Image (tube, rainbow, N blue to C red):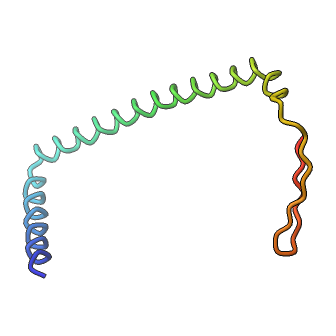
Amino acid sequence: MLPFLIGGVALAATGYGVKKYLESDENCEKVQEALFKGCDWLDEVSEKSEYFFDGVHQYIEEYFDDNEEELENDGIEDIDEEISHEGESLVIASS
C-alpha cells in the first residue's frame, strides 16, 4: 500500500512541476518546437518505410514473374482427399 501512496505523491509532484514549467511562454514554445520536430521525424520515417515496402513488393512481384514456370511445375501432384470430422466432410482438391 505504501508504494502506491509514494507513487501517487510522486506523480502529483511531477504534474505540478510540468504545469509550472509550461506556464512560461518560452518553455511552452520549446515544447511545441520539440513536438513539431518529432512529427517531422515521424513523417520522414513513414516516407522511408513506404519506399522500403514498395521495393520489397516490387522484388516479390519480379521474383514470381521470373519463376512462374518453376512454381507451376513444383512437383506436387494433384490431391483429392476427403476429410471427415464429427459428421462433417470436407473435400480438398488442388489443381
- The image shows residue 38 at horizontal and vertical percentages of 29, 38
- The image shows residue 46 at horizontal and vertical percentages of 44, 34
Q: Quadrant of the N terminus?
A: bottom left
Residue situated in front as seen by the camera: 57 or 23:
57
Please tell me whether residue 77 is drawn above or below residue 65 in the rendered image: below
Left or right of residue 18: residue 83: right
Q: Residue at x 13, y 73 (%)?
A: 8
Q: Residue furthest bottom?
A: 1
Left or right of residue 17: residue 88: right
Residue situated in front as seen by the camera: 1 or 94:
94
Please tell me whether residue 51 is drawn above or below residue 25 in the rendered image: above
- The image shows residue 36 at horizontal and vertical percentages of 29, 38
- The image shows residue 60 at horizontal and vertical percentages of 65, 26
Q: Residue at x 58, y 26 (%)?
A: 56
Q: Where on the picture, by quarter, is residue 11?
A: bottom left
Q: Quadrant of the C terminus?
A: top right
Q: Where on the picture, by quarter, is residue 4?
A: bottom left
